[in-house]
Image: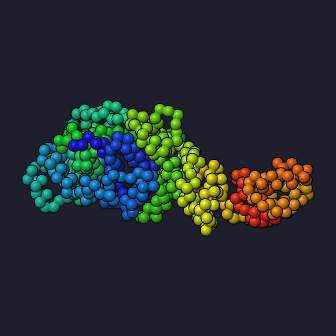
Amino acid sequence: MSDKVRVRFAPSPTGGLHLGGVRTVLYNYLFAKHHGGDFILRIEDTDQSRFVEGAEDYIMECLKWCGIEPDESPAVGGPHAPYRQSERKESYREYAEKLVADGFAYYAFDTPQELEEMRANYKTAENPSPQYDNRLRTKMRNSLSLDAATVQQLIADGTPYVIRIKMPENETISFTDMIRGEVSFNTGNVDDKVLLKHDGMPTYHLAVVVDDHAMEITHAFRGEEWLPSAPVHLMLWRWLGWEERMPQWAHLPLILKPDGNGKLSKRDGDRLGFPVFAMNWTDPRTNEFTQGFRERGFLPEAFVNMLAMLGWNDGTEQEIYSMEELISAFSMDRVHKGGAKFDFEKAKWFNHEWIKRSGEERLLPDVKAVLERSGITGADDSYIKKVIGMVKERCTLLGDFAEQGRFFFIAPAVHDIDAIRAKWNGDKENFFAELQGVLGDLEDWSTASIEAAFKELATTLSIKPGELQLPFRIMLVGGKFGPTVFDIAEAIGKEDTLKRIAALPAVA
């Protein structure tokens, strides 16, 4: 086995990618790249009843948008292909049968109805939710309670069966978690999980162990909700003879609701008005639509930066990191044990910071798309970049470029007259009538020249320039927003500036 770090993200193609899932990907990726290792994408599609068309492509597109490119995957291949569990089906049966032969697993022929009866018949005040475990396994229809001849006949007759792990009755097993330290379990409290289903497909428990071994995974990072499954996986690693090659595990803290009360869910996002998926997702079975961070107007750099900080820091006050900086700084010993509250306002802060720090060339494709969706087309790239530079400080989400930059392309249809009505008078009306002539004669159409001509005319007419700038802004922009008004005039050009002055509706 190679000493090279090898990590994997193994999602099920069942729907949209929750930000918690993306954070798991990210921590795997950062750890691998920090140590010069490989990041593997493996699709866990063994539960065909939950398979959703298009979900695998969606997952890969999400990772690509985030800048997380797998070294091995179903798309790019690799030395341990195939990378879809459904294409590795035969290998799982081999190991399940070996566990049965070695006495660590058994055939179970119970029907769904019999399982329901078990849960009802053995329910007590002390045991309100009976499980298929060491206490009840001998009361069920399986190869532990039936004689060998009956078992062979049932199999020969094609009777449906599953293979279950035979958990030890009272053994303490432990492992060292990279985040939580030593974690111990009593095997008697764990039920006999199904390893191989009726259709010959493995469950997660068997497949994850077999595949992690086959793909030489050195470190396995997953959400803390998988901690209760750890005893099953520990026993499988031991019983299959691979314990010395078991990956180091880390169980990541949950991403919590904004109030800290429980795990963040899609319903919380719907209720509170923010996305929880990386990208838009429409469930093909129900047509239910869920908005994603990408379509809400987040830069991938900001999304990744925000996720990294949800449960990790490098011990400094730094908050803004590029992917390269995250790779350099990341270590599992700085991941928090406790859950991290999701704060959408903080998420927007990250996006605002990244928009401000991003160059015009980087923002151009995204802003062009935003402008086109708002009906602004055909503008020159160099002009759009100029506008980006002037308004990006005012934009929190990419969609804000439409509102903050629209007037650079289209004259305002509505003017906030109420903002200037109280201080409007004949002197100001006369000033703007004369300003049209002054600006019309201006040969050097630059910010400095426009401002100088504007203030010189104000001085000549004995009006304070400061009292005239808001009306000028209302004429050019339509409202009380935007960058310096003389910069706006320079950008939109002489012809448009004069037209907008002339187009101001009556104020009085």
Q: How many marks?
A: 0
Q: Quadrant of residue 413?
A: bottom right
What is the image's colouring? rainbow
In this picture, is 436 found above or below 172?
below
Can you name the residue that lies furthest to the bottom here?
378
Q: Nearer the viewer, residue 266 or 85?
A: 85
Residue 13 shows in the view: yes
Left or right: 475 as drawn, with respect to 109: right
Q: Position of residue 167 (x, y in %)?
A: 22, 41
Q: Is residue 220 above or below residue 384?
A: above
Instruction: Classify residue 98 as left or right of residue 88.
Output: left
Given residues 293 and 154, the one toward you in this image is: 293
> What's the residue at 49%, 42% (across, down)?
321
The residue drawn where x is 72% and y is 64% is: 411
391 displayed left or right of 201: right
Q: Is residue 307 visible?
A: no
Q: Residue at x 51, y 48 (%)?
A: 302
The percent coordinates of residue 494 (x first, y second) are 75, 63
Residue 459 point in image, percent of width and height: 88, 50
Residue 179 in picture, x, y percent from top left: 37, 35
The quadrant in which the N terminus is found is top left
* Quarter occupied by the C terminus: bottom right
Residue at the far front: name it.
443
Which residue is at a point 28% across and 42% down the rendered structure image?
Answer: 4
